[in-house]
């Protein structure tokens, strides 16, 4: 008799429930054709519906026409945001790698100071750091008789690169500590100096571990760039608000803001998608 | 040499002795009011973002595909757009449309700027919390869930009594990072004139022309607030600790 033969008579049996259907693959769950279609439909509905409502008053232009008309201006502003984000990322990364290496320095005071700087900039709000840089950096610095002007947007770049530096420093520290000590020991036994070990052996290995976090940080930074509009740099957000007040139409508000939101979404989504992909790829082999 | 003088002047600590935030009654009152506003903003946003995160993570495990996709879209949208633009969108776009006629017959906003700040910040941080809790839920061993099924728990009971308590323990470190970020993001409320710490400080420094002093006070205040939050989360993590989960 087979062990799982049906029992005669009808015993009450508690059937196991289906708890969850099989989990969707990550990429599928986050963003698939349906989501894309829903987003596009929602956007289209928001854009087109007021346009239909406008039919009664023919002297007004349609929402889409206005958006298209402003698109070149806004694209210029958005390009400026991207430029700010790239510059801040470059400065922040270079400083952050240095600070991260100092955080694992064998000399205790250096280590503590680097730790303190990292924690301070990591835990202060981006906007406050921006204000700090905008208001406290002089508008020009005189070095050896030549005046170097500091326009607002360069100060904003510096202000944004400070938190990036702190985050980067933490990532680098974590990555360096995660490299097996065998790497250090074997390099030492081959007679490398500490500097050579760091630049030639340890740091190249951290690149792979830091890459996903670094890309995520870039996306976060890009999403922080509209902050510069608060402190008077004319980026895409400032231009949008100027465009809105120039048009002076209440029904334009929602489409315009959604339009800008979708610009950022289109720029940032691929970055975070690739980040996920890399995270998954590197998480398998430790 | 001029540069060195500027640097020394910049670092000179005598400003600490005549801080208007300590010495001046009026400014101290305003500063404390701003601090209290920031604390209120942070606590409310943390509370609602946690609720959004827990509900969203529950829905992501639901059998309904439509619901899952909807939550996925919500998370993807709020994660990949700037929080400042979201705040502007809520306050200037939706807030302008959502108006009711007040007692005096004039249109009044339905939700105050403080309300919109709480809503926008909760949604932004909530979307990130959904991801964090989902990762925690997925890390709960399947066998634990199956054991609960075998004991006859319903889906809701399993989520509430078994999966969620374990998932929270697993996701606490990531949650901490996000909540710290949320407290830092409350400064965005400055942009819609919520009288929180940054806004008040900007008022004080434009009236008393003491930018450097107020800036330092401001930075120390925020680092202090974050330190308190980190300490609370750390205590919470310690209290919740059970063998085998988290570190």
Image: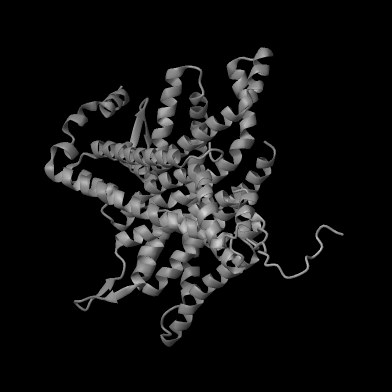
Quick check: can you spot residue A94?
Answer: yes
Q: Residue at x 35, y 66 (%)?
A: A245
Q: Nearer the viewer, residue A62 or B35?
A: B35
Residue A65: % across, % down: 49, 73
Image quarter of the N terminus of chain B = top left
Toward which corner of the image does residue B152 lie, by quadrant? bottom right
Q: Nearer the viewer, residue B172 or A212?
A: B172
Q: Residue at x 51, y 17 (%)?
A: A106
Q: Horizontally, is B25 left or right of A205 in the view?
A: left
Quick check: can you spot residue B81?
Answer: no
Residue B69: % across, % down: 59, 64
Q: Nearer the viewer, residue B245 or B194?
A: B245
Which residue sits furthest right? A1
Q: Residue at x 56, y 41 (%)?
A: A213
Q: Horizontally, is A256 left or right of B224 in the view?
A: right
Which residue sits furthest front? A9
Residue B221: % across, % down: 29, 39
Residue A239: % across, % down: 41, 59
Q: Nearer the viewer, residue B8 or A104?
A: A104
Q: Residue at x 46, y 42 (%)?
A: B240
Up the image or down, B101 lies above or below B115; here it is below
């Amino acid at each position: 008799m087979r062990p799982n033969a049906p029992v005669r008579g009808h015993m009450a049996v508690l059937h196991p429930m289906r708890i969850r259907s099989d989990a969707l693959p990550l990429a599928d769950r986050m963003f698939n054709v349906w989501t894309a279609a829903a987003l596009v439909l929602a956007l289209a509905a928001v854009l087109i519906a007021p346009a239909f409502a406008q039919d009664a008053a023919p002297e007004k232009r349609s929402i889409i026409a206005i958006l298209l008309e402003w698109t070149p201006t806004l694209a210029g502003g958005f390009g400026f945001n991207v430029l700010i984000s790239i510059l801040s990322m470059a400065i922040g990364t270079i400083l952050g790698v240095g600070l991260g290496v100092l955080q694992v320095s064998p000399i205790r005071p250096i280590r503590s100071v680097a730790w303190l700087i990292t924690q301070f900039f990591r835990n202060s709000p981006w906007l406050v750091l921006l204000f700090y840089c905008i208001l406290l950096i002089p508008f020009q610095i005189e070095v050896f008789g030549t005046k170097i002007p500091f326009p607002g947007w360069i100060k904003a770049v510096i202000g944004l690169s400070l938190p990036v530096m702190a985050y980067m420093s933490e990532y680098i520290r974590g990555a360096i500590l995660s490299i097996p000590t065998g790497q250090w020991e074997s390099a030492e036994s081959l007679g490398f100096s500490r500097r050579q070990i760091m630049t030639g052996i340890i740091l190249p290995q951290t690149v792979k571990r830091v890459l996903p976090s670094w890309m995520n940080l870039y996306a976060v930074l890009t999403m922080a760039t509209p902050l510069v509009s608060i402190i008077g740099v004319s980026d895409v957000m400032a231009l949008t608000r100027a465009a809105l007040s120039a048009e002076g139409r209440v029904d334009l508000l929602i489409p315009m803001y959604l339009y800008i939101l979708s610009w950022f979404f289109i720029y940032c989504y691929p970055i975070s998608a690739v980040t996920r992909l890399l995270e998954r790829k590197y998480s398998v082999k430790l | 040499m001029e540069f060195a003088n500027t640097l020394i002047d910049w670092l000179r600590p005598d400003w600490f002795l005549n801080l208007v935030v300590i010495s001046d009654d009026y400014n101290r009152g305003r500063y404390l009011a701003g601090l209290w506003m920031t604390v209120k903003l942070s606590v409310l946003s943390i509370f609602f973002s946690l609720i959004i995160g827990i509900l969203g993570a529950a829905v992501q495990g639901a059998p309904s595909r439509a619901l899952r996709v909807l939550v996925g879209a919500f998370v993807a949208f709020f994660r990949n757009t700037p929080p400042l633009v979201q705040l502007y969108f809520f306050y200037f776009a939706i807030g302008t449309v959502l108006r009711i006629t007040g007692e005096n017959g004039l249109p009044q906003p339905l939700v105050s700027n403080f309300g919109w700040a709480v809503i926008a910040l909760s949604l932004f941080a909530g979307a990130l919390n959904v991801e964090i809790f989902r990762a925690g839920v997925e890390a709960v061993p399947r066998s634990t869930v199956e054991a609960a099924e075998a004991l006859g728990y319903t889906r809701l009971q399993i989520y509430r009594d078994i999966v969620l308590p374990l998932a929270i323990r697993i996701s606490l470190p990531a949650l901490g990072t996000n909540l710290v970020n949320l407290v830092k993001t409350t400064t965005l409320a400055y942009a819609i004139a919520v009288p929180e710490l940054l806004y008040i400080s900007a008022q004080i420094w434009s009236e008393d022309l003491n930018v450097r002093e107020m800036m330092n006070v401001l930075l120390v205040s925020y680092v202090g607030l974050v330190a308190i939050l980190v300490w609370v989360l750390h205590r919470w993590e310690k209290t919740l600790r059970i063998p085998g989960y988290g570190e």
